[in-house]
Image (tube, rainbow, N blue to C red):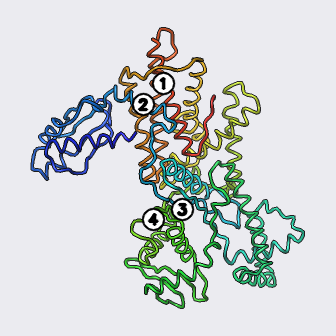
Amino acid sequence: MKLKSHIHNIIKDAFVKADIKYEPVMVSEASKPEFGDYQFNGAMALSKKLKKNPREIAQNILDALDCTGMLAKAEIAGPGFINLWLNPLWLAKESQIALQDVRLGIKKRDNPIKVVVDYSGPNMAKEMHVGHLRSTIIGDTLANLLSFLGDEVIRQNHIGDWGTQFGMLIAYLEMKDEDGSVSLKDLEQFYKDAKAEFDANEEFADKAREYVVKIQSGDKHCLQLWQKFIDISLGHCQEVYDKLDVNLRPDDVRAESFYNDALPKVIEALDAKGMLVQSNGAQCVFLEEEETPVIVQKGDGGYLYATTDLAALRYRVEVLGARRISYVVDARQREHFKQIFMVAKEAGFVSKNVKLEHIAFGTMMDKEGKPFKTRDGGTVKLIDLLDEAVVKASETIKNKEDYSKEEIDALAKIIGIGAVKYADLSINRESNYIFSWDKMLSFEGNTSLYMQYAYARIRSLFRRHGGSIKGEIVIGDTLEHRLVVMLLRFEDVLERAAEDASPHLITTYLYELVTLFMRFYEQNPILKDGVEKEVKMSRLLIADLTAKTIKQGLRLLGIKVVEKL
């Protein structure tokens, strides 16, 4: 249910009846219950254009408003605001419809588009570390959300698998793995050992450089070793993705090597457009108002990340047919993507109707406000962090109920992984955030565990009720009115979160919803003796819609729910 769109249409109709030239309608959710459910605050902006008193304009609009269906009443407040109250009968009917729909009344878009979401991007030379967490879960949530709303989402995991370091790595792999038994469980140590050999052994270094050339020229033996290394590396990544419960699969990988044959064509196309300028032997693109050029080919003929990114953009637009391309990459790459997007548009690789966006995000920090590290200052491996989350979740819940060990293990996986993901997604993605086990595994505040507890409480309510839930939703008081309005705002929240690529809007909504439901649960008895059957059924239905909304919201964030807690 797009509540705000319905309000917009009612105001627009009133504009026509009041003979006011249509302007963008300024409607927002009311800040307090006494101000209604929504508020029109555009009369003051119109007063300058119409040269009328804003309250007079507001009165003209008010006189033309249709308050026979969706709206129950409207009142002028302050210098020209119009406070709007939704009709309880209309709300009850719409919430009943949402409850009976598997999608909670949320329709798929009439005009879906193809969207490429580029996220995670692990380094093939090392194990995934905490620095890959934010890209992975923010990107996965965005992909989940856009797909749910009806867009055709193409997940792309852009990995670096083509460069100087891989000559060194495959040479070391060959040297250490003649019988094919190496598992590369510690990829980071493997890289360090290879680098140490490279620095200490000139013969090995020469062989590594030779292997780089052989890889790029298609040497069969070197490509076999290279492929083995990539397969083992990606196997480790997939283990992390499965543990993290994100929807990235091997088929989603589009490595740098995939675009290798397209790189010369990028240079040719830029040259044909007259965009290339030679500077110190390198081929560069100079952009207006940009101090540094974009280097697309080195003096020795080699290509750079910029060249590969341009080739990827062409592929995503021309072959995949994307109309929106979202790069979920940390904020330090802001200038890089700004320049790449400018070059792509100037070169005609991307048309004006394609939306290019860098979904930037901040850094995970420790309690002292420094980048998150191990106690000895090393990089925290992502898989170790996730394993620790499960252990800590187990410690948090083991005394809550009389669980068996199997039940605790199953719950701990859902709660621990969900806590890590929710804590990250609840922060405005562009902000840095402080990593805190105590906060993320708290039953209070805007945490995954608070959401899980609310959902489990509702499920417990149904188990205690025992019977079927039949009847109609009847809004009996202001608190129930506010809760149902909040439930019907879900689609508006999802649309805005998708447009702005801001998962924290979903977590903020869920927190406000659950907080409101807890008040409803405490103040409006449901199963208590003496509650009339019709009232009991109505409140059970409202609780059911709340549970389904929580579950759907968490599902979009990539978090499972637990039935009891």
Earlier-in-chain disc, 1 versus 2? 2
SS at badge 1:
helix
Q: Nearer the viewer, residue 260 or 513?
A: 260
Task: Please say if the residues under marks 1 and 4 sit with CB atoms less than 8 Å apart.
Answer: no
> What is the quadrant of residue 275 in the picture?
bottom left
Task: Please say if the residues under marks 1 and 2 sit with CB atoms less than 8 Å apart.
Answer: yes
User: CA–CA distance between discs 1 and 4?
Assistant: 42 Å
Query: Which numbered disc covers residue 95?
Result: 2
Residue position for label 3 = 329
Query: Which numbered disc covers residue 541?
Result: 1
Q: Residue at x 76, y 33 (%)?
A: 406
- Closer mark to the observer between disc 4 and disc 2: 2
Residue position for label 4 = 356
Near mark 2 (Cα within 10 A), the count class, few <14, some 14-19 or many ≥20, is many
Q: Residue at x 69, y 38 (%)?
A: 412
Q: Amino acid at mark 4?
A: Leu
